[in-house]
Amino acid sequence: MLIYKAANKGISIDEVSFVETEAIITTDIIEKIKNIATKKATVVFTSMNAVDAVTAQLTQIPDWKIFCVGGVTKETVFNFFGEKSVEGTAKNAKMLAEKIILTGESKEVFFFCGDQRLDELPETLNANDIKVNEVIVYTTRLIPNFIVKNYDGIIFFSPSAVHSFFSDNTIATSVVLFSIGTTTTATIKTYCTNKIITSEWPGKENMIDLVLDYYKT
């Protein structure tokens, strides 16, 4: 849909995977998820992959108070848990942590995440005396690809994708880079000095709109 949207504006987009995620379905993880589901818990999601991994193990909707980042993660949470289960959303993990702190209602949270999760959320919460129970429910594997084609712009959706891309590729200084979030942007800057356009909001649709707006001007 988004590729067609761009094509209608005269912009051709190629999709190339540089990371692969896989849910962890060990007995230990399944038991942890089911145990947390019996509690009136405050739960945090910063990834759609984490939502998918957790909901695959649930047979009914638990009594959770959920905080999550926006974009596709929020949509995935809404689809399973419903909008009323969501206590708060934010643009990124750091702002989400700050929102949890501001509510002043939670002294303990369960953070469902991947093995490559960033430190911002747990460090911010811990620094404000909120206990973070981290449950790693999926893994991320880099799958580098050598790119032969020359592109005017490249879109990155995660720091892992940046590491994977630059492990096999170099780019001309004229290539414009589009990044989702400040952490991904910071990662890009460790590899090159190209122009970077950063999307403040998570989600592919917001990113594609940013690309279309850039090339429109």
Image: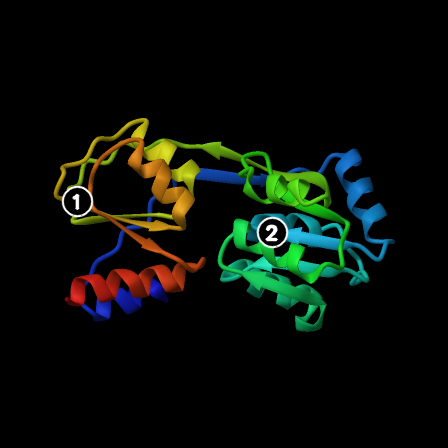
Quarter location, residue 123: top right
Quarter location, residue 31: top right
Say left or right for 140 vs 208: right
The residue under label 2 is 97
Seen from the viewer's position, the closer of residues 131 and 134 is: 131
Quarter location, residue 12: bottom left
The kind of residue on which mark 1 rests is Val
Could you say where residue 50 lies in the image, as x and y percent from the top left?
62, 48
Say left or right for 119 vs 161: right
Say left or right for 146 vs 64: left
Front label number (2 vs 1): 2
Residue at 41%, 50% (x, y): give it.
Answer: 181
Could you say where residue 176 lies in the image, as x and y percent from the top left?
20, 48
The residue under label 1 is 175
> Badge 2: how crowded within 10 Å, few (<14), some, or many (20+)?
many
* Res. 143 mark: none
Q: Secondary structure at mark 1?
A: loop
Please identify the quadrant where the C terminus is shown. Answer: bottom left
